Amino acid sequence: MGRGRAKAKQAKIARDLKYLSPPTDFAALQHELRGEPHSVARPVEDTADWSDDGDLPVRHP
């Protein structure tokens, strides 16, 4: 596999991140901006292991 395929994959992912956005929880945003505690929010765990070749992280369940 050459660099072209990896570059194309990175370009596809970058396009997806640019044009596709997750749904926004405006109620949670409103609580956060007011400074009110929001019991539903949980910290996100980063379980990604970055591969040595600089490509995308490998997720483990």
Image: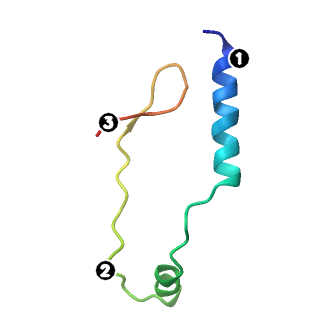
Q: CA distance from mark 1 to mark 2?
A: 46 Å
Q: Amino acid at mark 1?
A: Gly
Q: CA distance from mark 3 to mark 1?
A: 27 Å
User: Tag 3's secondary structure?
Assistant: loop
Quarter that holds the C terminus:
top left
Q: Which residue bears the numbered disc 2?
A: 39
27 left or right of 39? right
29 left or right of 36? right
Quarter that holds the N terminus:
top right
Q: Which residue bears the numbered disc 1?
A: 4
Q: Which residue bears the numbered disc 3?
A: 60
For the rendered model, the colour scheme is: rainbow
User: Does residue 5 sit above or below 2 in this rendering?
Assistant: below
Q: CA distance from mark 2 to mark 3?
A: 27 Å
Q: Amino acid at mark 2?
A: Ser
User: Tag 1's secondary structure?
Assistant: helix
User: Does residue 48 sit above or below 23 in this rendering?
Assistant: above
User: Does residue 41 sit above or below 16 in this rendering?
Assistant: below
Quadrant housing residue 26: bottom right
Q: Residue at x 46, y 87 (%)?
A: 35
